[in-house]
Image: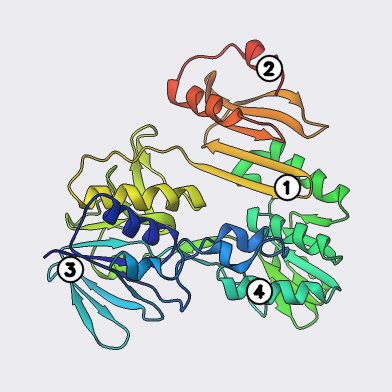
Amino acid sequence: MATFVIVGAGLAGAKAAQTLREEGFDGEVVLAGAESERPYERPPLSKEYLRGGSEREKIFVHPPEWYADNDVELRLGLPVTRVEPRNHVVRFANGSRRAYDKLLIATGATPRRLPGPAYYLRTVEDSEALRRRLAEGGSVIVVGASWIGLESAAAARAAGCRVTVVEREPTALHRALGPELGGVFARLHIRNGVDLRFGTAVAEVTKTGVRLSTGERLTADLVVAGIGVVPEAELARDAGLAVGHGIRTDASLRTSHPDVYAAGDAAEPFHPLYGRHVRVEHRAGALRGGPAAARAMLGQDVVHDELPYLSTGQYDLRMEFSGDIDGYDEIVHRGSVEDLRFVAYWLRDRRVIAGMGVNTRDALPEIQELIRSGAVIDQKELSTGSP
């Protein structure tokens, strides 16, 4: 009987285990994670769960009985410390070992750290601790105008806290959306009472606030970090697997070893549309990558070419984005940017490479169709009509 081991009990790992059973795999499935909680979704941790708008049970991928009912061996609170592809073995922190026929690494990512005491948002315990602290009110400094940073700022404002956001880039979401559309989110937070400090970095976090790279000191009751994540690729690197910005895989999510696969935040798969390796740090990468890897492990012909996707909700703004803005030379809008009801398209050489719908419905299918088509676009036609 074959044994498939999944290292990383998050969304990607849990969905991979589910897919293996749905596809008829009747061998052993071992799902191992470092956390003590069963697999759960992370996006709510900075959104509705942080704001207290979602019950705890709703964040979990499966009910607790699902794993036993589907004969999935769930090993929690026991990190894998070593992968030995040559021997087809994984070793655990308690000294035990498990042989495998196929292995999936879905270890996710870990937040970048600040020099000093700060709150982070990666685990359910992180979210619960921050929610309790925000309920006490006071002043908050959020370091990083990233998706996590801005969602945390919105949650802090909803809790009645005074909020300052510090960001080294010239505007919010500068790398994700560019200055034009990043500015939309900056203005949104300003209208909601957030003090934005762009073009400066945090040199130190203290018990009373932060010291900026300019020497200025800002006081606050707590500091929240949202300065990005680092893929958990050390297991793969130590095992001799190819690693770039994440664990390198082909389009079927197979690593440089034929019996080892990678998915989710830790993976950097080759994307056929872009002709390069692309790492996606958002929910969609795990939700779709875990099942794709599982099918590939079963020997199915898999091409994982899903377009990067993300969504956010901040104040009265709801947004969906897809694509990659790298190398864009033009932005076309349809609708009203001022009224926060529009669709934006990033173009390169008159071809759509990314798009975003703000407070609109059904924009995503058109955006993704335009990206995949690679067709030369008439900008006037793209900008007319309702969003």
Q: Which residue is mark 1?
A: 171
Amino acid type for the residue under numbered disc 4: Glu
Quarter of the image holding residue 2?
Answer: bottom left
Circle 4 SS class: helix
Q: CA distance from mark 3 to mark 2?
A: 54 Å
Residue named by callout 3:
100
Examine the rendered structure and indicate whether residue 284 appears above or below residue 161: above
Quarter of the image for residue 195 reads bottom right
Q: Residues within 10 Å of mark 1 (few under 14, many from 20)?
A: many
Whichever of callouts 3 and 1 sits on the residue coming sooner in the sequence is 3
Task: Report which residue position mark 4 lands on.
Answer: 128
Q: Mark 1 or 4, which is nearer the eye?
A: 4
Along the line of sight, which residue is nearer the eye, 270 or 282?
282
The x and y percentages for residue 17 are 32, 60
Q: Nearer the viewer, mark 3 or mark 1?
A: 3
Distance from Cα at disc 1 to Cα at disc 4:
29 Å
Q: Is 385 above or below relative to 28?
A: above
Q: Return the residue at label 2.
A: 383
In the image, what residue type sits under mark 1?
A: Thr
- For image coordinates 52% across by 60% down, the residue present is 41
Colouring scheme applied when the structure was drawn: rainbow
Image point (45%, 76%), residue name:
35
Q: Earlier in the sequence, mark 3 or mark 4?
A: 3
Give the x, y percent position of residue 63: 46, 66
Name the foreground residue: 131 vs 351: 131
Precedes in sequence: disc 4 or disc 2: 4
Residue at 83% across, 77% down: 136
Answer whether labels 3 and 4 touch (C-beta < 8 Å): no
Q: CA distance from mark 4 to mark 2?
A: 43 Å
Check contact, mark 4 vs mark 2: CB within 8 A. Answer: no
Q: How many marks?
A: 4
